[in-house]
Image (spheres, helix red, strand yellow):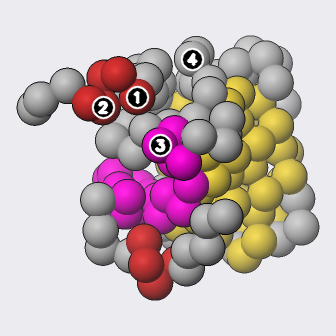
Amino acid sequence: MIVRTLDDTMNGDAHVFAPTWNSRRLLLAGDRMGFSLHDTIIDAGTETRMWYRNHLEAVYCIEGEGTLEDVETGDVHQIRAGTVYALDKHDRHVLRATTQMRMVCVFNPPCTGRETHDENGTYPLLTMADEEQPA
Ligand code: 9YT
C-alpha cells in the first residue's frame, strides 16, 4: 500500500515547474499503478497549449475557473470546480485560466516524473527503462 501526502511531494523531484503551471506528481510510473496522478496548479491569466500525442489524460478541476478550447473544432468549454474533461482522442487543446486553477490529472500511460511540454505541448513517451538510464 502506498500512502503519501501533498507535503511529501512539494519541492521534491516530483514537483515539476513550467512557465504557466506547476505539478505535484503524487503517483508516478515507478509506483506501478498503470496511471499517474497529479495535483496541478495553473497560474491565473495564463494560456497553455497542449497536445498529449502519447498519453490519455483526464483532468478534474477542483478550484478556480477558465476555458478549454478544442483546437480541432474551435469549441470553447467553461471549466470550473466540479468539471472534468478527458482527452480521449489525444485532442489538441488550449487551457486559459481566468483565475488560478487547481486540477487533479490522471495520465495513462503514467508519467515517470520528468516530463515537461515540448514546443507542441506534448510530453515524450518516457518509460521506466528511460528513467533508469544514467543522466
Ligand atoms: C491541466 C494540464 O494538463 N496541465 C498541464 C500539466 C499536466 N497536467 C501535468 O503534468 O501535471
Secondary-structure class at tag 1:
helix
Secondary-structure class at tag 2:
helix
Q: CA distance from mark 4 to mark 3?
A: 18 Å
Mark whose residue sits in front, 4 or 2? 2
- Asked whether 46 falls inside the magenta stretch, the response is no
Q: CA distance from mark 1 to mark 4?
A: 15 Å
Of the pair 48 and 35, the residue shown nearer to us? 35
Q: Is residue 83 above or below residue 63?
A: above
Badge 4 crowding class, 10 Å Cα cut-off, few under 14, some 14 to 19, many 20 or more, is some
Q: Start and end of the magenta stretch?
A: 14-31
Of the pair 59 and 64, the residue shown nearer to us? 59
Q: Which residue is mark 1?
A: 128
Q: Is residue 28 left or right of residue 60?
A: left
Horizontal and vertical percent for residue 71? 69, 23
Q: Is residue 35 above or below residue 41?
A: above
Q: Which residue is mark 3?
A: 30
User: Of callouts 1 and 4, which one flags the residue occurring earlier in the amino acid sequence?
Assistant: 4
Q: Is residue 34 visible?
A: yes
Of the pair 127 and 75, the residue shown nearer to us? 127
Q: Is residue 68 above or below residue 8?
A: above
Badge 3 crowding class, 10 Å Cα cut-off, few under 14, some 14 to 19, many 20 or more, is some
- Asked whether 29 falls inside the magenta stretch, the response is yes
Mark whose residue sits in front, 4 or 3? 3
Q: Which residue is mark 2?
A: 131
User: Of callouts 4 and 2, which one flags the residue occurring earlier in the amino acid sequence?
Assistant: 4
Report if the CB atoms under discs 4 and 2 are less than 8 Å apart: no
Q: Is residue 107 visible?
A: no
Q: Amino acid at mark 4?
A: Asn
Q: Which residue is mark 4?
A: 54
